[in-house]
Amino acid sequence: MKKKTSQDGLWSASGARQTAAIPSTPEKRDERNEDSERIVICEKDLSGRVVHQNKACIGVCNHREGEVCKGGCMEYFAALMKTSVAEKSALLLPAREIRNAYYDIVFFRGDDRLTTVMHRVKGVLSEKLPTLGEFKLTEREYEIAKLMLRGHANQEICKLLFISRPTLKTHVNRIYRKCGSRKNLFPKR
């Protein structure tokens, strides 16, 4: 007897129904699928040649295994390599735009591999980031605005960026001045 398929499972040659392990509820299944689709993983050798991509990476960058990657996250990595952080083995770039979406990007550099992990940013931050460009913020103001939109307190921002409170206050005032008002950046919740 040949295997038969049905809409609700597989049937073995003996006629016994076989089922796959399925998460308990449709909501949990959707949540797990959504999370796995948002985590983008790409492994490259040090020349930038793609060695492995997960499905989410293929969805963002198309299939590139065996090719040298020059776009997307590698543009950010190349820019980092020209700075003083080039020697670090792990680098985080929060909320960077790749193909009309925003991702937190982490680069892990080993002796012979570069692994990129990206997580798509959603919520208030992803809605507001495109509009921040309209206000002609400096790179530092943009970085501070992103942290503010993520809900970081002033003290946390100072620690993350290694700046003093008066310096942060100056940047925040300039951000609000350029945005027109605080309401433009932070609508009522």
Image (cartoon, rainbow, N blue to C red):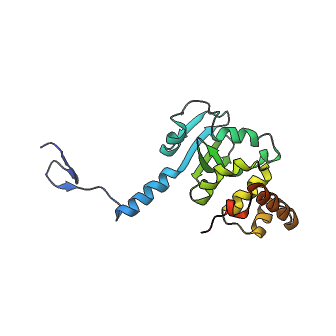
Residue at 40% over, 58% down = 30
Residue at point 75%, 40% (across, down): 79
Quarter of the picture containing the N terminus is top left
Q: Quadrant of the C terminus?
A: bottom right
Residue beneath the point at 59% across and 49% down: 118
Name of the residue lying farthest toward the left: 1
For the residue pair 90 and 8, the one nearer the viewer reads as: 8
Q: Position of residue 86 (x, y in %)?
A: 78, 44
* Residue 70 vs residue 147, the one in the foreground: 147
4 displayed left or right of 95: left
**Quadrant in which residue 76 is drawn:** top right
- The picture places residue 69, in percent across and down from the top left corner, at 62, 33
Of residues 148 and 164, which is closer to you in this image?
148
Q: Is residue 105 visible?
A: no
Whether residue 54 is visible to the viewer of this picture, yes or no, is: yes
Residue 47 placement (x, y as % from top left) = 67, 33
Q: Residue furthest front?
A: 180
Is 33 situated left or right of 117 in this image? left
Please state the horizontal and vertical placement of residue 99, each as a whole percent of the image.
Answer: 58, 40
Q: In which quadrant of the rendered view does residue 147 lie?
A: bottom right
Asked if residue 34 is positioned above or below residue 182 in the image, the reply reads above
- Seen from the viewer's position, the closer of residues 126 and 30 is 126
